[in-house]
Image (cartoon, coloured by chain):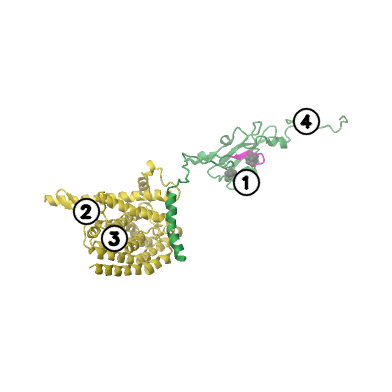
Amino acid sequence: MHVIRGIRGTFQPFWVTLRNMFRKPVTIQYPEEKQQLPERYRARLILTRDPDGAERCVACHLCSAACPVDCISMQAAEAEDGRRYAAWFRINFTRCIFCGLCTEACPTLAIQVTADFELAGRDLLKLVYEKEDLLVDHCGNDNSYNFYRQSGIGVAAPRGTNPGETPPADVKDLMP
Amino acid sequence: MNEMLVTLALILGKLLFIFGVVLFMAAYLVLAERKILGRMQLRYGPNRVGPFGLMQPLADVIKLLTKEDFVPARADKWLFLIAPGITAVTALLVFAVIPFGPTQEIFGQQVPLVVVDLNIGVLYFLGVSSMAVYGVVLGGWASNSKYSLLGGVRGLSQMVSYELSLGLSLVPVIMMARSFSLTDIVMAQQSLPFMLLNPVAFGVFFICVLAESNRIPFDLPEAENELVGGFHTEYSGMRFGLFFVGEYINMVVLGSLVTVFFLGGWHGPWLPPMLWFLLKVLAVCAMFIWIRASMPRLRYDQLMNLGWKVLLPLTLVNILVTGAVLLGLG
Ligand code: SF4
Ligand code: SF4
């Protein structure tokens, strides 16, 4: 039995390799052929806008805190009406490992992944993306979420004057 | 005077021809091996440089030539530098005695298509090809690295265990051809190649030749998975290239030897003799590649067992049987 198995084990591989030689290779010839990527593929990051067209990012630094390779940096600033935004926002794609942890940390859905993985380049500095490069003109995956609608803006504006707010009730007044 | 000049020119011409053809074949064997291996593993293999990747050998040479020629710290510098040369040169030297066609008539002279037709051609081949292992051993020793040393040691003990059977498996061939000259051996196979007359000797010789070429399943000195790169771990640039080219020249040379000893050399119907020779050599090389795609590497003790306990007794018995049959036939 041993001998038969040994002989078969010696000669069968030759048949297998010969048969494979006449099959079509499974290789995808990359620059000419492109692979069908999964829908939720994680590659280049973008900063999206809310449905009203304003920037979503509130410069909370949560994404840069979550990033395992520390490749996100930003400067927070505050607008007249108390709305926070990033004065500058920078992602160093030479260091990004496309783990997507920043998108999970983001409370405003501002930072999102796209399936564009073709980020190779000879000049490393060109791979450091600034806010202008990151900001896009659409909402990304979620077309309805607007962080400020949920939370309101800070106290810089008088109460009840923010868009969509009713003026506060006068507690000393007896009228309904 | 004039005649001498013509003779000299013919010899030089033959040398250049062999040199060119062997190096060309070695370069394209690398490509062929990579392509065939790729297809057998459901890949394409190199196909970027030039049409179908045909310029790949050129690209490889340019890459190897422009790389840094690195000598590790506290290596034995001179041995380290000459070791790759030994492998490539000995492989080329063997080709001196290989006849690749019948005697031709050029410029009114009888020109044998072999560089020198030594009457001890077989012994010359055995002697010179054993030198090739010096390249492996010295390279491994001189690199001052444990992986290289292990590779070198393996190369040495591997040679000890198959070289004996390699030589002895040729004894029946010599007995049947009644000559040590490779040309006479080919002549003796005019009607039937020795592969059919003595398949046992052929089998043993083929296995030993696989071991001689340091290829799978006998690539223990290299053994990428265990020894990084084996004896050539520390080599870079063109010195690594020499080892590499030496291995493929060796493939061509050993393929030619299998052809000469067992496949009937240039004999064959219809086609011109030199084409037959080339086809047979290529067939043997293709077989080498196919084996590489299909077989695992033998373990160290398995190689020893095979060499000493199976092949050696087999060749000895084969010599006796062949001798008895030859005597019986008168
Ligand atoms: S994907 Fe990962 S590595 Fe890249 S910026 Fe986000 S958290 Fe950092
Ligand atoms: S992208 Fe998201 S997590 Fe990062 S600072 Fe802006 S709001 Fe915060």
Dividing the image into four quarters, tell me where ligand 2 lies: top right
Tell me if mark 1 has few (under 14), some (14-19) or many (20+) residues whose alpha carbon lies within 10 angstroms of its own.
some
Label 3 marks a residue whose chain is B
Using the numbered discs, state the Cα–Cα distance from disc 4 to disc 1 in whole angstroms.
37 Å
> Which residue is label 1 attached to?
A66
Earlier in the chain: of badge 2 and badge 3, it is: 2
Q: Colour of chain A?
A: green
Using the numbered discs, state the Cα–Cα distance from disc 4 to disc 3 in whole angstroms.
105 Å
> Which residue is label 4 attached to?
A166
> Which residue is label 2 attached to?
B102
Please state which of the two labelled residues, at mark 2 or mark 4, is closer to the viewer.
2
> Which residue is label 3 attached to?
B194
Q: Which chain is yellow?
A: B
For label 4, being within 8 Å of ligand 2 is answered no
Amino acid tagged 3:
Phe
Earlier in the chain: of badge 4 and badge 1, it is: 1
Which residue is more in the foreground, B123 or B62?
Answer: B123
Label 2's element?
loop
Label 3's element?
helix
Amino acid tagged 2:
Pro
Q: Is residue B164 visible?
A: yes
For label 1, being within 8 Å of ligand 1 is answered yes
